[in-house]
Amino acid sequence: MTLRGVLRWCALGGLLAALAIAAPAVSALRDRLPVCGAPGPASSRPPSGPASASAPGACRVAVTESTVRAMKPPGFTPSGYHHLGAGTSAEWSGVSGRIGVVDGKLRAGTYDFVAGRFMVKRDLGKGNIAWLEAGWAETGWRSPGQPRIYTYNTNTKSWQFYDQYPIKAGDTVWLDLHTDSGGVWQAWLWWNNKWNMLTAQKLPIGGSAFVEQYVEVHVDDSKPGRIDLPPVKVDNVQLRPAAGGPARFWREDVSTLTGVAPGQQQQSGGFCLNWVTRYDTWNAGDCV
């Protein structure tokens, strides 16, 4: 298991003891934005521009809960983590794109989870990794069968769920993670045709970071079982250059790490990834 997985597992394990309420870091950037208020309906069109505090209608989410909750022979999915996706081998200042939502049919009362997410991260050395991730997740410990918008960061080491944005299987969500300056990294959700800031975190990773786009599945080590995952579709993935300038699509000319040799399909635990356009359009789910 990777160090990141260990940290995530420690957060999950905290649920056995208690549900801890943690206040997210509040930055001056967040303070300048009005509170989003009633979420309104899901967006009816794609983003009209990049996520930014100066974007029309931009607002910040009023956080109400931050809970530390931190798989394929027949009938079983190997336990542990399964990752399908890609990461950059160079640094960027942000990532954005659209992720499809599915129902993983997770088992209630387990540490199973499925997530479609983007991440920015940096290895600080001596076993310390700092990161921020955002996407949607379905978990066995919190309303299985109901996906939720979420963020996770290493400042609070907590899952933050945003129930005010109701999503369901078949929906798509537009997300953006980036930093403008000063190492304050922001996670944004396009909702009700405007950008909603989910969180802003002063992370010790500077003004650029390594980027990941992944479908992630975790199967409870203590309760072997099976998870069936319909294809999660990801598209319109763009990267913001570390040196500034407009975002660009994550294509083959971007130095990219996939964990497999060229020409090989990425597989893990009975799940497979299929590239439609490397690397900005793809899907991952049960191997067929």
Image: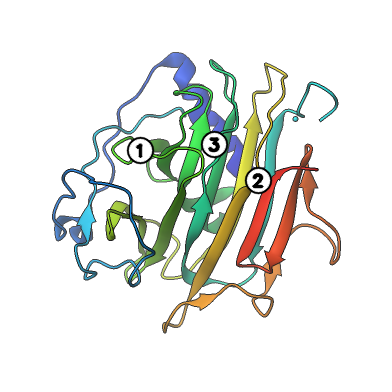
- As displayed, is residue 78 above or below residue 244? above
**Three-letter code for the amino acid on which mark 3 is drawn:** Arg
Sequence order check, earlier mark of 1 and 2: 1
- As displayed, is residue 208 above or below residue 133? below
Residue 134 in view (yes/no):
no
Residue matched to label 3: 8
Residue 121 placed where, x, y %? 52, 57
Q: Secondary structure at mark 3?
A: helix
User: Where is the N terminus found, in terms of image quarters?
Assistant: top right
- As displayed, is residue 13 above or below residue 188? above
Sequence order check, earlier mark of 3 and 2: 3
Mark 3: few/some/many CA within 10 Å (<14, 14-19, 20+): many
**Three-letter code for the amino acid on which mark 1 is drawn:** Pro
Residue matched to label 1: 166
For the point 52% across and 66% down, the residue is 236
For the point 19% across and 63% down, the residue is 57
Residue matched to label 2: 231
Q: Secondary structure at mark 2?
A: loop
For the point 67% across and 69% down, the residue is 277
- Name the one closer to the observer, 3 or 144: 144
